[in-house]
Image (tube, grey):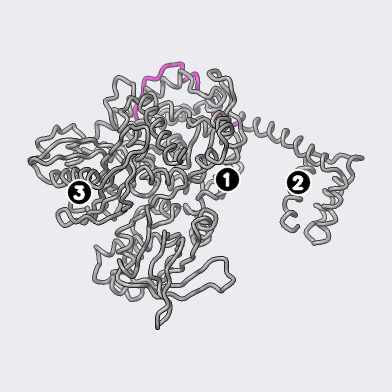
């Protein structure tokens, strides 16, 4: 079967399944799924469903969702319209349909500024909330993005196209069709063709110096790019110009760098001298040799891996201090990395380029040892069958976008069936899912409400710092408890939709708040949720489930009844004050819930016992492997290590003990050390 057609069928099945479980219409379930992709891809930051369909002045109006971050100084308002069709095979969407959808978004935006239109709407309706927001923030908006999401195939292949202005504010349009969604899910590629044509679109080619020799593995260039040109490029592509980990880091910090801004405003001619410049990559470039030297004409998939704050700040100066920007120039180191090696090389360039930052999202990108360890656990650790299943399965942690799809597609039909049994789709989760589960449990539902990337950036800082102090706590027990948090979180997601008090909307906020509240209230009693029991059962115990629904009802009440002066409930859910209000409520939990909690010391003792049990088991495994290799093998390892001078006296003694096999069997501790030594020496073979 054609790969896109197969994805189309899987997507519709997933959407229909989500709709059934969550009690949603299929279009809404599709939009929720795509909303997470848009957030993770950097198309938007935070996402709120906001369905409205109507007319004004004889014109059709429609909007399905929006994104607006009041803390983001870029001032981008994103409006989303959804086009979802159920069909056996992928359908095409033509230009006229695209224009019709986007026109309805434009009509809504224009109408939102008109008082008569706003006053004609019911104040509690989603349409009024969004129209009121647009009218209130109009002076803060610097750009409007119109986004069409569809499970049809767009043949036009256009992206980030300027479509004019609304009230003097520039407007661009983007289409996320089936092909683009498939590319992102399978490989993390979000763009149609992100080609930066410096010569044709951005006021001229950029002079460059070649910085790599003929034998270098990758081409490299040094360039000096005008600030005006960089700001224009960023104005079109926004955060999608930034390599994913840099985007996460920026969204965690969110503010334009004051020092950079002040230099542009007060000493623009010194910007080049004061600023460290950019580190960038591209899949390919067009370089032209002219009489004066080499010039960068265009770059395919240009990505800034260090210098995101510089880029965003220069873009902000385009509005705040446009006259000074003419004197700003930025140095750029550009490395050409072919697309097939992007996943391997770009994160490493990013890591080293960002090394001056003590903790940053680059350190916490997909190749960080934390993610590698979680991935290793997920491929190896069997989840108990519990009391509702008969097979042991595994949870698939996707540390790099596309791993799950790759693992399935490279198998034969029979192998794929076995894979689906071993790794059920319902037990698949990503880095941003992990961040939702973990930050909810850690009492940060207002941060989770900001969306996938900002929330992930926040967790990156927290766990990055914890890991740098000690990584020993992130062991198998930590992973099992993470899965337990996933089970609880997803169970709340499933149940909220069916509660009599739930009137629709803000489900994502209610879920994270409810989970955070239950964990918080357990902590107040110096106890914790029994995550180890949830892991063993692979489901949520009844007492805990009921407690979660008590907390969810209270969360719904707090979120949907904001203080006077706040009309946008989605924005209210992102505030610390919202969480503080729920955290301070006394809730009527059943006694069985209190009884189900465990003492903190008991949970710590369980973890210690598991660690001892694993250590004993690992010791036996290590001893078995050393014995199987035999004394002659270890004698060769000893001789080789001595010959290259890579063994200290203690290590020589350990290998000598192993070389005495089978006459004398080394201890478990010695066997552990011997295996570590041989792993290190393998690099010198």
Sequence order check, earlier mark of 3 and 1: 3
Front of the two marks 3 and 2: 2
Q: Secondary structure at mark 3?
A: helix
Label ID, residue 13 = none
Q: Is residue 212 left or right of residue 138?
A: right
Residue 24: % across, % down: 32, 27
Q: Does the magenta-highlighted stretch encompass residue 595?
A: yes
Sequence order check, earlier mark of 2 and 1: 1
Q: Residue furthest top?
A: 591
* Residue visible at 59% across and 71% down in the picture: 215
Sequence order check, earlier mark of 3 and 2: 3
Q: Quadrant of residue 290?
A: bottom left
Q: Is residue 182 left or right of residue 75?
A: right
Q: Quadrant of residue 55?
A: top left
Residue 611: % across, % down: 66, 34
* Residue visible at 42% across and 28% down in the picture: 518
Label ID, residue 137 = 3
The CA span between labels 3 and 2 is 62 Å
Question: In which quadrant of the rendered image does the C terminus lie?
Answer: bottom right
Q: Which residue is mark 1?
A: 372
Residue 459: % across, % down: 46, 44
Q: Which residue is mark 2?
A: 675
Q: Which residues are magenta?
A: 584-604
């Amino acid at each position: 079967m054609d790969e896109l057609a197969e994805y189309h069928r899987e997507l519709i099945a997933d959407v229909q399944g989500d709709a059934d479980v969550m009690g949603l219409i299929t279009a809404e379930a599709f939009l929720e799924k795509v909303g997470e992709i848009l957030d993770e891809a950097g198309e938007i930051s935070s996402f709120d469903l906001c369905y409205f369909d109507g007319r004004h002045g004889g014109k059709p109006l429609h909007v399905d969702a929006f994104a607006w971050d009041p803390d983001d100084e870029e001032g981008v308002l994103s409006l989303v319209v959804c086009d979802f069709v159920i069909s056996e095979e992928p359908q095409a969407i033509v230009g006229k349909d695209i224009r019709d959808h986007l026109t309805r978004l434009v009509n809504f935006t224009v109408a939102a500024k008109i008082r008569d239109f706003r006053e004609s709407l019911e104040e509690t309706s989603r349409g009024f909330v969004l129209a009121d927001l647009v009218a209130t923030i109009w002076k803060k908006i610097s750009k409007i993005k119109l986004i069409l999401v569809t499970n049809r195939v767009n043949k036009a292949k256009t992206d980030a196209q300027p479509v004019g202005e609304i009230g003097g504010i520039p407007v661009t349009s983007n289409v996320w069709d089936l092909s683009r969604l498939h590319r992102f899910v399978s490989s993390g590629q979000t763009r149609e063709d992100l080609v930066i044509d410096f010569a044709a679109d951005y006021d001229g080619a950029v002079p460059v110096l070649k910085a790599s020799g003929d034998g270098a593995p990758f081409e490299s260039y040094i360039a000096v790019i005008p600030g005006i040109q960089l700001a224009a490029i960023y104005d079109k592509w926004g955060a999608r110009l930034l390599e994913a980990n840099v985007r996460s880091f920026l969204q965690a910090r969110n503010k334009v760098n004051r020092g950079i801004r002040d230099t542009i405003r007060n000493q623009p001619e010194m910007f080049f001298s004061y600023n460290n410049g950019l580190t960038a990559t591209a899949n390919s470039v067009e370089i032209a040799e002219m009489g004066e030297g080499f010039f960068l004409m265009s770059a395919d998939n240009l990505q800034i891996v260090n210098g995101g704050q510089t880029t965003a700040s220069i873009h902000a100066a385009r509005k705040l201090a446009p006259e000074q920007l003419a004197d700003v120039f930025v140095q750029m180191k550009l490395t050409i990395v072919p697309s097939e090696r992007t996943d391997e090389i770009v994160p490493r360039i990013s890591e080293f380029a960002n090394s001056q930052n003590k903790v940053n999202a680059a350190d916490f990108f997909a190749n960080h040892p934390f993610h590698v360890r979680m991935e290793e656990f997920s491929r190896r650790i069997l989840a108990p069958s519990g009391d509702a299943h008969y097979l042991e399965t595994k949870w698939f942690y996707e540390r790099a976008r596309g791993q799950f799809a790759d693992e399935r597609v490279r198998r034969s039909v029979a192998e794929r069936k076995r894979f689906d049994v071993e790794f059920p789709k319902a037990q698949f989760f990503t880095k941003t899912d992990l961040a939702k589960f973990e930050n909810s449990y850690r009492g940060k539902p207002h941060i989770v409400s900001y969306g996938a990337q900002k929330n992930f950036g926040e967790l990156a800082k927290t766990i990055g710092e914890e890991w740098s102090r000690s990584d020993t706590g992130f062991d198998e027990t930590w992973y099992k408890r993470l899965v337990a948090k996933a089970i609880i979180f997803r169970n709340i997601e499933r149940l909220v939709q069916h509660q009599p008090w739930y009137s629709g909307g803000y489900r994502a906020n209610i879920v994270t708040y409810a989970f955070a509240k239950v964990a918080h209230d357990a902590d107040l009693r110096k106890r914790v949720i029994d995550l180890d029991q949830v892991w063993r059962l692979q489901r949520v115990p009844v007492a805990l489930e009921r407690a979660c629904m008590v907390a969810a009802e209270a969360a719904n009440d707090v979120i949907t009844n904001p203080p006077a002066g706040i009309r946008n409930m989605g924005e209210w859910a992102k505030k610390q004050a919202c969480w503080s209000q729920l955290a301070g409520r006394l809730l009527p939990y059943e006694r069985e819930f209190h009884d189900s909690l465990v003492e903190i010391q008991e949970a710590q003792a369980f973890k210690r016992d598991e660690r001892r049990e694993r250590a004993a088991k690992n010791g036996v495994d290590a001893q078995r492997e050393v014995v199987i290799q035999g004394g002659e093998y270890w004698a060769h390892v000893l001789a080789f290590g001595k010959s290259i001078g890579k063994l200290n006296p203690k290590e020589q003694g350990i290998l000598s003990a192993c070389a005495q096999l089978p006459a004398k069997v080394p201890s478990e501790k010695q066997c552990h050390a011997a295996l570590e030594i041989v792993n290190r020496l393998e690099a010198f073979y």
